[in-house]
Amino acid sequence: MYERKFTMPEALVGSSALRRRNSVSGIGTGKARKVDGGWIINGKWPYMSGSRQSTWAQQGVVLEGYDGPVVPGINMCYLPMDAMTIEDTWFVTGMQGTGSDTAVAKDVFIPDAQMVLMDERAGQIDRTKRHFGAPSDLLPAVPVVRTTGVAQLVGAVEAMLEIVTAELVKKPVLTTFITPRTNSGAYMRDLGEAAAMIDTAKLILFDITAKLDRVGLGEEYTLAEKARHRAGTAQIIELVHGASESLMFQAGSSGFATDKPINRYWRDVSMATRHIQNIPTIGYEIYGRNTAGADPISPPGSY
């Protein structure tokens, strides 16, 4: 599978957001049936980010009539995008550019090499795999993906701050005698708070990124550190969301015009902060349970 997919220079991979059927049997709205030499795949996967640009898809499936060894988790199949159809379903307020439409597979055959079963610990560091040796081979996928995602949100809210700051010297405080807004103690206080939120979010981001850099150089990444990472990104999300909302109050109603860049940043931030990997309360519970030695609510590979 590696040689077929990743040696093609034009190959791009999209992945759907996989939905939990139940807590044990697996995750995904697709099904896989074993046949000679491979599998027959049927399914419907929403939230297929990058569906319009990708040539391959990584899809979660549950197994039908399979008596081989598996463990609870996500069985993954790899499908060429041209073997599926795309339904237009991505009608959303924010993050419209991700093209996260719905992919549909009907009786698609794939060879065994394009199926990854949960018959061993997937998502872990495997020093025996082919081409092993790059720093990225030592990095757990979920923390890295989550960190790169929240970094973009920090950048977006920084852009919002730049827009609001540039307008302060041009606009009065309507319904008052104050002009420009830099003469308003209330506006200056709120601007400073938003800037401090962003600064704090960046400090946390740089801290967890530095840890990932060290892991890439061989440092251990303990379960407790992964839980701390999950809570740290939860804190970033709350700071980014708070700064974003404050800056929109400062921008005023004109900031909600659809042709204004700050409006697009706000819509994208508002939606992205609600991604399942970003929900703060889940991150805090994971960290709290790890701190107290209580039973976990998620497998380690999921955070």
Image (cartoon, rainbow, N blue to C red):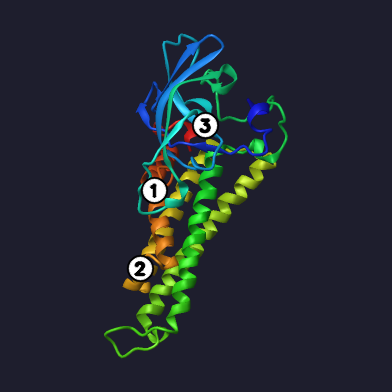
Can residue 112 be seen? Answer: yes
Q: Percent x, y for residue 199?
A: 51, 64
| Mark 3 → mark 1, Cα distance in angstroms | 37 Å
Q: Which disc is residue 134 wearing?
A: none
Observer-nearest of 47 and 288: 47
Can residue 28 be seen? Answer: no
| Mark 2 → mark 3, Cα distance in angstroms | 38 Å
Q: Percent x, y for residue 259?
A: 40, 67
Residue at image position (65%, 33%) is 6
Which residue is at the far left?
A: 175
- Residue 233 lies, with reference to residue 296, above or below; the image says below
Check disc 2 and report its element: helix, strand or loop. Answer: loop
Q: Which disc is residue 82 wearing?
A: 3
Check disc 3 and report its element: helix, strand or loop. Answer: helix
Residue at image position (53%, 28%) is 79
- Residue 294 lies, with reference to residue 167, above or below; the image says above
Check disc 1 and report its element: helix, strand or loop. Answer: helix
Count of number-bearing discs? 3
Residue at image position (45%, 64%) is 197
| Mark 2 → mark 1, Cα distance in angstroms | 29 Å
* Residue position marked by numbered label 1 in the rendering: 280
Sequence-wise, the earlier of marks 2 and 1 is 2
Crowding near the residue tagged with mark 2, few <14, some 14–19, many ≥20 C-alpha atoms within 10 Å = few
* Residue position marked by numbered label 2 in the rendering: 257
Sequence-wise, the earlier of marks 3 and 1 is 3
Residue 12 placement, left or right of 294: right
Residue 44 placement, left or right of 112: left
